[in-house]
Amino acid sequence: MKIVLSVVSLALCATVWAQHEDHNMPGGDPKAWRMPPHDYPMPPLPGIATAVPIVGPFLARMDADDLSQFPEARPGEIVEMADGEKLVMRASIVRRTINGSTFLMYGYNGQYPGPLIKVERGATIIVELVNEIEMPTTVHWHGLRLDNRFDGVPDVTQPAVKPGERFTYEVHFPDTGIYWYHPHVREDIQQDLGLYGNLLVTPPEADYYNPVNKERALILDDILMDDLGPFPWGDRAATHALMGRFGNVMLVNGAPGYELSVERGEVVRFYLTNVANSRTFNVVFGGARIKLIGSDVSKYEREEWVESVVLAPAERYIVEVLFDEPGDIEIVNSIQAIDDFMGEFHPHTDLLGTVHVAETRVAESHAEVFGELREHEDVKADIDAFRQYFDKPVDHSLELTLEIENLPMQLVQALQFEAGLYAPPIEWNDAMPMMNWLSSSEQIHWKLRDPDTGKENMDIEWSFEVGDVVKIRIYNNPETIHPMNHPFHVHGQRFLVIELDGVPNENLVWKDTAIVPVGTTMDILVDITNPGEWMAHCHIAEHLHAGMMMTFTVTEP
């Protein structure tokens, strides 16, 4: 396989880099297209300086030469809110310095990430969005089963909020857990530039979770940078439409190099959220023991010991970690990377942060409770009402697939070469950065296809009533010209992943986003409780903008 992949990769690079020779790519202008950053050495093949996407480059406030006129962003703050309280949230331009480069990004209330909004389950708050960036925006309250009017989808639930305008959201929190908010307009740009934040919904029950010494919310992200600063995004359409935009600088809570200090014997509850455009993380806490507690919309039926936590874009997981040995514990993203040019698979780690464990032992240790695996009877009882539907016939099916249009013939030929080779179930890294960058959402069409009707994406027409329990079978077709994993997100409802490739899921948890690996068939059971017109889509930002989305309607009975 290595030799075949290498030959194909050489052909791919030679043909791709020879394209668009009529374009000139300035070498020192941070606002211009240039060779994209890449993880592996590549030979200086002909045409390397002339291949560019068909769309122009975009950076925040490209007209600004004096960055000092913009406020420096500050770390995100925790905002505790009671039922009925109001928060004004401004989306604005901020100044950041990352890895020695100073540039402009976006921020909510001048913070990175945006404020962590902490509320008790059952509360409803008012959030007034003020748009101070240069493009329209909205706020989507990801994972919340709130009123459809406030779901934040432009042209579906509300008009986009234009620069200088405001929009008021009523945000209701019916479920305990960790959620997040982000735009639903050009997420590939706005979210990547910093418009995101967490929502922590606390339980009124004192014993809902285990006792711990600390709680921390960690938002995982990446950003694509080179020596000139952030690599530009596409202006009128998204670049990196094949695989999504992978960053090369890892961020935790908006900054590289997360640090936490604890005493020996402390148990820390981490609320993990993946806000990256495309990267799936595999999080390892050194040699520390990890207990999996919950995911998107609930706790698991049973707590489990795990060695790592896999988070697709938009997924959340709740884990507890015991730090019982002094020293530094590295939090890393541990993956099986691919060097597509050399045709090699190899282990790779990215440092996300460090936990400094002191020699002194904590006064009150919860290690004994941590050592027990609880069964959550409240979750099991909730799910029990749905078990009668697990074996019901499939109500609807979706096939995840791809079509391409107007790509240069040489790129098409390279994709056709690649299509006959092994496709990994999950793309952990960008193994072909040039080809990925050169594919725009005007040329790449990712599709949700209903095989029963032949309809695709926004032409799909599904209607349900409140109280329905809907079984959906999702198949990620591995025979496409470039198969790719897809995190499938359903707005406004919750679902259970009940089967993968015919194997029942033995430990259930309510979800709103679940990754569908290449070649996998996933059965989900959707609890239809919330009326309105709702979105369902792939949460790789560039795939969404390349068309991979649909709506469904829920009416009152």
Image (tube, grey):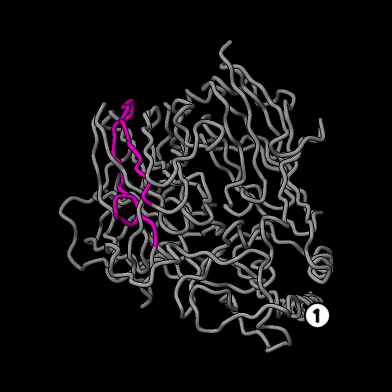
Name the residue furthest bottom: 44
Secondary element under disc 1, as helix, strand or loop, is helix
Q: Quadrant of the N terminus?
A: bottom right
Q: Is residue 128 magenta?
A: yes
Return the residue found at the far top. Answer: 557
Looking at the image, residue 138 lies above or below residue 17: above
Give the residue displayed 75% in from the left and 38% down from the top: 456
Please state the horizontal and vertical placement of residue 340, each as a whole percent of the image: 70, 74
Q: How dense is the environment of label 1, judged by Cα within 10 Å: few (below 14), some, or many (20 and up)?
A: some
Coordinates of residue 362 in the picture (x, y in percent): 18, 57
Q: In this view of the protein, which residue sits in the foreground, 94 or 170?
A: 94
137 to the left or right of 428:
left
Q: Nearer the viewer, residue 47 or 124?
A: 47
Residue type indicated by callout 1: Val
Please state if 388 lies on the left or on the right of 262 as rendered: right
Count numbered badges in the picture: 1
The residue under label 1 is: 7
Residue 467 in the figure: left or right of residue 181: right
When the figure is inspected, residue 108 is found, relative to residue 533, above or below; the finding is below
Where's residue 258, x and y in %?
33, 65
For the point 28% across and 28% down, the residue is 204
Question: Looking at the image, which residue is at 25% across and 47% down?
Answer: 78
Q: Which residues are magenta?
A: 105-132
Residue at image position (54%, 19%) is: 385
In which image quadrant can residue 146 be found?
Answer: top left
